[in-house]
Image (cartoon, grey):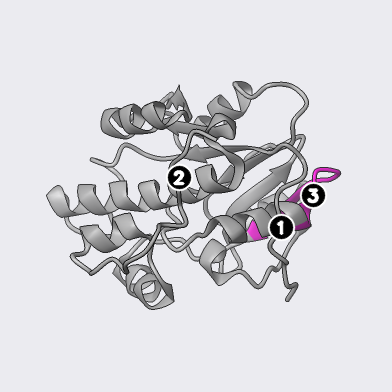
Amino acid sequence: MLTATPRAPACNWHVVVPVKDTRHGKSRLAPAGALRTRLSRALADDTLSAVVAAVGAARTWLVTADTGLSEHWTDVGVHVVPDPGRGLNAAIRAGLAQLPEGPARAVLLGDLPCLTPDDLAAALGTGGCAGEWFVPDEEGSGTVLRGGRVIVPEFGAHSAAAHAGQGAARLELDLPRLRHDVDDPQSLAAAVRLGLGPATRVALGLAVPPGPDHRATSTG
């Protein structure tokens, strides 16, 4: 497994983060209701906070139909693209279509509550902007991060194989916080052990450690 060294992204990355309306997302995580909505929102907030801290709000693109999420992150300076409502890959394509020409682009899942800015920066720096690449999830069959200048999103079941089939390089990075997405109670419990971001800790009623939050929400 490759070890990624934390570094500042050097390729002027623009990162697209798709997030399903939190009222309807994460159906395997908890029964429908306030708790599931609160958890879904928290997962997204922790992910987006890490992205903003890593690349800046002006280079972060949120694709969602969630009004509350949109309003909050617009105030932070993040670009918000309406979700066309045709599934995950259609949402990603809508986000990619809004990016300016030239800068390197990446797509990151929106349910990575353990993610840190250093880990994202390390992955972007390791992948680089000269080719096409992706980082699989910890199980190996999914994709958490896809980078390059030409991205045809194939997120979903067996997405790692689909992205590899496009010729994208598979990066087996030793970055468990990046590679751990949350979909169900088991993966949430594992995320608690790995170390959650503050929003998800609050949603679960867990204490937030004192001190500054590394996922600063500056406009960058």
Coordinates of residue 155 in the picture (x, y in percent): 56, 47
As drawn, 34 above or below 126: above
Residue at 86%, 43% in the rendered image: 130
Coordinates of residue 173 in the picture (x, y in percent): 69, 68
As drawn, 104 above or below 186: above
Residue at 39%, 70% in the rendered image: 191
Q: Secondary structure at mark 3?
A: loop
Task: Write down the residue under mark 1.
Answer: 7
Coordinates of residue 2 in the picture (x, y in percent): 75, 72
Give the magenta range: 126-135
Nearer to us of marks 1 and 3 is 1
- The reply to whether residue 139 is in sight is no
Whether 200 is among the magenta residues is: no
Q: Residues within 10 Å of mark 1 (few under 14, many from 20)?
A: some
Task: Write down the residue under mark 3.
Answer: 128
Q: How much space separates mark 1 and mark 2, taking CA atoms?
A: 19 Å
Total numbered labels: 3
Residue 48: mark in rendering? 2
Residue at 68%, 57% in the rendered image: 123
